[in-house]
Image: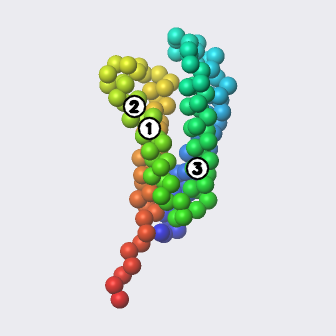
Amino acid sequence: MTPGSKFIARAVFALAALYGIPVLLLGLFGEAQFNAAMPPAITHPEFYYGFHGVALVFQLVFVLITMDPERYRPLMLVALLEKLAFFGPALWLYSGGRLTEGGPFYGAMIDGVWALLFLLAWWLTRPEKKGVS
């Protein structure tokens, strides 16, 4: 892995955590605002808080990857799946008319961008091929 690749991987995952932590923390305290913006009101708050809690904990995985991208390279694919777990269903729901443009849709599209950046970081940090002597 080149120093530039390591820097890019660290930057991608650090920025993802720096973006995700405040957004998800705000979400934990934003159920009332969410209910007002996206009626009807949430009837199963455990899903709302569970989503935010799990996603918030996953930010720690991003921080871990930032510390040593080479060691934690396999976790980059797990992180990619975490982003695709929201992005994919949102696209599917949107294509079927079950999700309109708005907060959740735009959040999912942002996760799609992060997924591409995570894939790039994973690709850039692949082990260097050893030459034949």
Dot 1 amino acid type: Ala
Please state which of residues 2 and 94 is positioned toward the viewer in this rendering: 94
x and y percentages locating residue 118 in the rendered image: 46, 50
Name the residue that disc number 1 marks.
85
Give neighbour class at mark 3: few <14, some 14-19, many 20+ (Cα, 10 Å): some
Residue located at (59% from left, 44% from top) = 59
Please state which of residues 35 and 15 is positioned toward the viewer in this rendering: 35
x and y percentages locating residue 50 in the rendered image: 59, 30
Confirm or deny contact between disc 1 and disc 2 (CB under 8 A).
Answer: yes
Instruction: Using the rendered view, name the quadrant where residue 120 is placed.
Output: bottom left
Query: Which numbered marker is on residue 61?
Result: 3
Q: Residue 12, relative to residue 86: is it above or below?
A: below
Name the residue that disc number 2 marks.
89
Say which label, 3 or 2, has the lower sequence index: 3
Question: Helix, strand or loop at disc 3?
Answer: helix
Mark 1 to mark 3 CA distance (whole Å): 16 Å
